[in-house]
Image (cartoon, grey):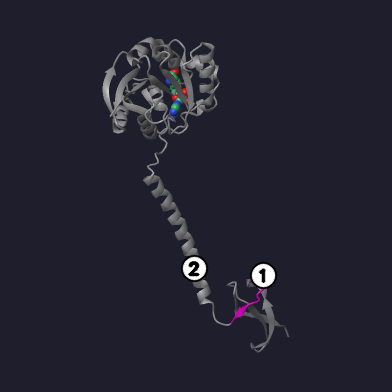
Amino acid sequence: MGRSWRLVPGPWCRNGFRRDERQEVAADGLAHSTMGLDTTLLEPNESCNQVFSAPPWWEKRLSEVARLSLSMRIAAACIAVLMASAVCGQETNVNPGINNHYRNPDYQRWVNVFERPGREVFDRRWEILEATAPKPGMVVADIGAGTGLFTRLFSPRVGPDGRVIAVDISRTFIDNILRTAARQGLVNIEGVVNTDRDVALPAGSIDLAFLCDTYHHFEYPQTMLESIHRALRPGGALVIIDFRRIPGYSSPWVIGHVRAGGKDVRKEVEAAGFRLVEQRDFLKTNYFLRFVKI
Ligand SMILES: C[S@@+](CC[C@H](N)C(=O)[O-])C[C@H]1O[C@@H](n2cnc3c(N)ncnc32)[C@H](O)[C@@H]1O
């Protein structure tokens, strides 16, 4: 006569698995002998040393609570991160990737781009210099100095009692500006490699902040404006020259590349604690705005 087996529930182990037992079932359908431990419900390499006779309802609850508390802890951590960024006022990047070209630039290649005839701000650089009006003795920060086109023009204007600080997120640009300035004997030029959120200048240390085609490259404009505001002396000036962004007037490249036009930039700058004091319209594809720190 054939033999058959059945699995019967056994006691529970501390690890939450059950130690089931196999019983031989005789032809009359009655179980006659327990064949011992069935390990199918045990985890691999685990033994069931501690056996409890009570059903482990509390064990299940505990693991449910543990699971719940893990998800609650993850949710709490996410909320904490969100609240911290809200409290710290962490600005989100408005222009991700726009400065990738400048992270490790070929200096000469960018000289050929920024200092070439046909680029309006290069062609009209002397008028821009006159309109910006740096005075002897001033400390001028050329923020987003690039290859140093304007840094070099400001240098003789502020004279031996003044300083021009070339600020850029690209160390290559700053190193090369300092190299060419030394070669040309422009001893009042300094260089600062900043971060994309901070102009990295001491509070109240500059008279004029100058941005040519740089504002639209700010990835964190609000945070940058706050740090420029801090770096300016009381009554200090901020000059912004940047692309006009007017649908139907500006080139498709400008429309695609430049985030905000003059009107929006003015609003952003005023919201950061500046007042517009001058607007000049001598440029065709760029606007010229002068603000003062209030
Ligand atoms: C289009 S270039 C203009 C260079 C120069 N002002 C000119 O007109 O020839 C923009 C420059 O801004 C720099 N830049 C971008 N974000 C910056 C930031 N947050 N602070 C300082 N420089 C930044 C870039 O590395 C780049 O050199």
Quadrant assignment for the C terminus: top left
Q: Where is residue 105 in the image (x, y as percent from the top left)?
A: 54, 23
The amino acid beneath tag 1 is Glu
SS of the residue under disc 1: loop
Report whether 194 appears left or right of 240.
right
Q: Which of marks 1 and 2 is nearer the N terminus?
A: 1
Q: Residues within 10 Å of mark 2 (few under 14, many from 20)?
A: few
Query: Which is more toward the observer, 12 or 135?
Result: 135
Report whether 34 appears left or right of 214.
right
Q: Does the residue labelled 2 lie within 8 Å of ligand 1?
A: no
Location of mark 1 (residue): 46
Disc 1 versus disc 2: distance between alpha carbons?
A: 22 Å
* Magenta stretch prevailing secondary structure: loop
Magenta stretch bounds: 42-52
Q: Position of residue 84 (x, y in %)?
A: 40, 48
2 in the magenta segment: no
Report whether 22 appears left or right of 161.
right
* 251 to 64, vertically: above or below: above
Quadrant assignment for the N terminus: bottom right
Q: Can residue 165 be seen in this view?
A: yes
Q: How crowded is mark 1: few (under 14 residues within 10 Å), some or many (20 or more)?
A: few
Q: Where is residue 80 in the image (x, y as percent from the top left)?
A: 42, 52
State the residue at coordinates (45%, 24%): 167
* 91 to 12, vertically: above or below: above
State the residue at coordinates (67%, 67%): 44
SS of the residue under disc 2: helix
The amino acid beneath tag 2 is Glu
Location of mark 2 (residue): 64
1 and 2 marks in contact (CB < 8 Å): no
Q: Quadrant of residue 285?
A: top left
Query: Which is more toward the observer, 249 or 110?
Result: 110
